Image (tube, rainbow, N blue to C red):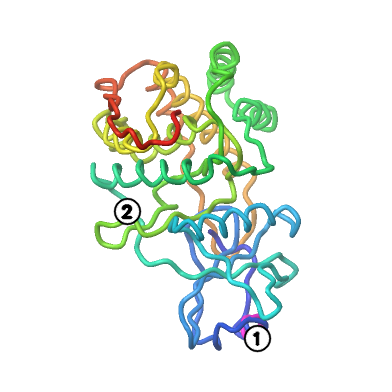
């Protein structure tokens, strides 16, 4: 949520004239995130977030807007797309496809507790549950993504990094499971994409990495961020996250057996993507880059098995769970 495309007050006023959302009072750029341009906008009728999409076209955005609308209807706390006076959810602003969302309450939690991890695990289970029969046209193949990113970065890497990545890709090619349950996954559920209002989870943000992928991968991506303290995995927090998830969606034994493999490829994926942003930065008025070394170090810890202990998987007793992972 950096600011790559600046807008003026008068431009926003003209833009909001197409909506029945009141007149613009104030606005400010949002610094979190790295992909799109976002502004907080206060109007005479409420608080909103305006997102200018830097790389996706109108057609490419349509599935994401439909997904957000569906999730809103199921009361998943996510950004709710606002329709203009012609019932259109996407318009152009400064030559960029742009959408308006209601601003969700709450703040980002930088140091999550066990209770935060539990709420995130339960909310992720609900997200997977409510979309289990939903066709989302964008497919995620994380191994292919890692190989593509590696090819883009190859000439920029040190020999040590190249050897580490090559070895990990070889391991993943041999061991990544091919028959895990798939469905709609967020694929980027980091701390800065979740809001808490007091002790209650109040918002899940940034669904623009979402796709149809392995549900266990979504859990691994989430655990790698939410369940680390000072860069080291906290198995007790992983247990808290997984146990809460399993109250609604119990994990199959096969998924549990592949847990460490999924943690490893999730760490590799975000090491490579952060390296890409670092080595090929985009210009912007306000931009944010995230440290790729965090995930390099995390990958090495997963590879070396240096977690203090393995997480305890919950033996679910909820007979109303509608499916398993």
Residue 280 relative to residue 109: left or right: right
Disc 1 target residue = 17
- Label 2 and label 1: CA atoms lie apart by 35 Å
Q: Which mark is residue 250?
A: none
Quarter in which the C terminus is drawn: top left
Location of residue 42 in the rendering, given as x and y in whole percent from the top left corner: 48, 80
Residue drawn at x 36%, y 57% is 108
The span picked out in magenta is 11-15
Q: Residue furthest top?
A: 174
Dot 2: few (<14), some (14–19), or many (≥20) neighbours within 10 Å?
A: some
Task: Report which quarter residue 242 is drawn in.
Answer: top left
Callout 1: SS: loop
Residue 175 relative to residue 303: left or right: right
Disc 2 target residue = 109
Image: 322 above or below 306: below
Dot 1: few (<14), some (14–19), or many (≥20) neighbours within 10 Å?
A: some
Q: Is 52 colored magenta in this rendering?
A: no
* 2 or 1: tag closer to the N-terminus: 1
Residue drawn at x 62%, y 49% is 281
Location of residue 53 in the rendering, given as x and y in whole percent from the top left corner: 65, 60
Q: Is 13 colored magenta in this rendering?
A: yes
- Seen from the viewer's position, the closer of residues 151 and 171 is 171
Location of residue 317 in the rendering, given as x and y in whole percent from the top left corner: 27, 30
Location of residue 31 in the rendering, given as x and y in whole percent from the top left corner: 48, 62
């Amino acid at each position: 949520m950096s600011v790559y495309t600046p807008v003026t007050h008068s431009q926003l006023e003209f833009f909001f004239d197409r909506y029945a959302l009141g007149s613009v009072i104030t606005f400010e750029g949002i610094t979190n995130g790295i992909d799109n341009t976002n502004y907080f906008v206060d109007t005479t009728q409420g608080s909103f977030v305006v997102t200018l999409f830097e790389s996706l076209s109108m057609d490419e955005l349509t599935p994401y807007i439909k997904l957000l609308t569906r999730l809103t209807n199921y009361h998943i706390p996510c950004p709710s797309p606002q329709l203009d006076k012609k019932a259109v959810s996407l318009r152009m602003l400064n030559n960029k496809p742009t959408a308006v969302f209601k601003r969700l309450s709450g703040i980002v939690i930088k140091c999550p507790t066990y209770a935060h991890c539990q709420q995130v695990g339960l909310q992720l289970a609900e997200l997977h549950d409510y979309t289990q029969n939903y066709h989302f046209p964008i497919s995620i193949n994380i191994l292919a993504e890692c190989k593509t990113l590696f090819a883009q970065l190859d000439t920029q890497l040190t020999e040590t990094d190249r050897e580490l990545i090559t070895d990990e890709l070889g391991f993943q090619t041999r061991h990544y499971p091919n028959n895990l349950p798939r469905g709609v996954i967020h694929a980027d559920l980091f701390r800065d994409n979740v809001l808490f209002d007091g002790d209650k989870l109040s918002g899940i943000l940034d669904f623009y990495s979402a796709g149809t992928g392995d549900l266990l991968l979504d859990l691994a991506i989430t655990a790698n961020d939410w369940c680390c303290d000072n860069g080291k995995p906290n198995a007790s927090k992983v247990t808290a996250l997984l146990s809460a998830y399993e109250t609604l969606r119990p994990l199959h034994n096969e998924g549990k057996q592949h847990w460490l493999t999924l943690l490893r490829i999730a760490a590799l994926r975000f090491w490579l993507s952060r390296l890409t942003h670092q080595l090929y930065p985009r210009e912007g008025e306000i931009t944010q880059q995230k440290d790729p070394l965090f995930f390099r170090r995390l990958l090495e810890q997963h590879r070396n098995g240096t977690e203090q202990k393995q997480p305890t998987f919950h033996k679910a007793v909820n007979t109303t769970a509608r499916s398993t992972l």
